[in-house]
Amino acid sequence: MLLTLVSCTPQPTTESPIDIKLYQNWELQPGDIIAGHKVTGSLGDISIALKGGKVYAPYEGRLQPHKPGCVMFSSSDVPNYLLRLCGLKTPNFGLRKAGEALGSSDNLEFAVLNKRPDSKWALVEPSKQLLEQMLQAP
């Protein structure tokens, strides 16, 4: 009987890390270690004090690991954009529907990246509407 229960238990989704080439290149990047302290944001990131609040998928997409402490959210609906989130606690990796929780955060570092014609990614300013959609429960 125990084997039946264990085999029916959903297994966590395993996602491969996503690696991208940035058009802009700064010396300090999220995930770097400086004097024993982890860098959680970089130029181009928006810092939001969430105090444990949840972050929601703005549309259907996939959440994947990126660098230590950071994840990327991508979607075939908007293939030229990636959302980088650093500081997300217990991220829910894998495919997510619009409005599903991606995780929670005390201090979220958020960036939007746009794919250029040379296949590199450039940081762009996120819209208030996108941020509101990601921070308010559906």
Image (cartoon, rainbow, N blue to C red):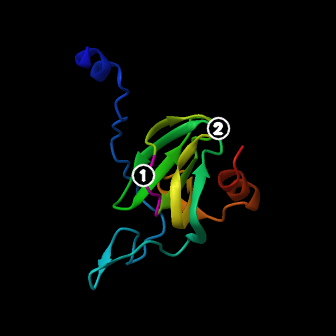
Amino acid type indicated by mark 2: Ala
The quarter of the image holding the N terminus is: top left
Cα distance, mark 1 to mark 2? Answer: 18 Å
Instruction: Decide if residue 123 is on the left or right side of residue 66.
Output: right
Badge 1 crowding class, 10 Å Cα cut-off, few under 14, some 14 to 19, many 20 or more, is few
Q: Residue at x 71, y 51 (%)?
A: 133
Q: Is residue 71 above or below residue 74?
A: below
Instruction: Decide if residue 71 is on the left or right side of residue 97.
Output: left
Instruction: Decide if residue 123 is on the left or right side of residue 39.
Output: right
Give how far across and how far down residue 62 sits, in percent.
Answer: 50, 39
The answer to whether marks 1 and 2 mark residues whose Cβ atoms lie closer than 8 Å is: no
Say whether residue 96 is magenta.
no
Mark 1 or mark 2: whose residue is earlier in sequence: 1
* Quarter of the rendering containing residue 69: bottom left
- Outermost residue on the bottom side: it is 35
Q: Is residue 68 among what the camera can see?
A: yes
Q: Residue at x 49, y 53 (%)?
A: 118
Q: Is residue 94 above or below residue 119?
A: above
Q: Residue at label 1? A: 90
Give how far across and how far down residue 71 sits, in percent.
Answer: 44, 53
Q: Which mark is residue 98?
A: 2
The magenta segment: 87-91
SS assignment for the magenta stretch, majority: loop
Q: Nearer the viewer, residue 77 or 108?
A: 108
Badge 2 crowding class, 10 Å Cα cut-off, few under 14, some 14 to 19, many 20 or more, is some
Q: Which mark is residue 115?
A: none
Give how far across and how far down residue 42 sits, in percent.
Answer: 48, 74
Q: Residue at x 38, y 54 (%)?
A: 66
Q: Nearer the viewer, residue 105 or 58?
A: 105
The quarter of the image holding the C terminus is: top right
Q: Callout 2: helix, strand or loop?
A: loop
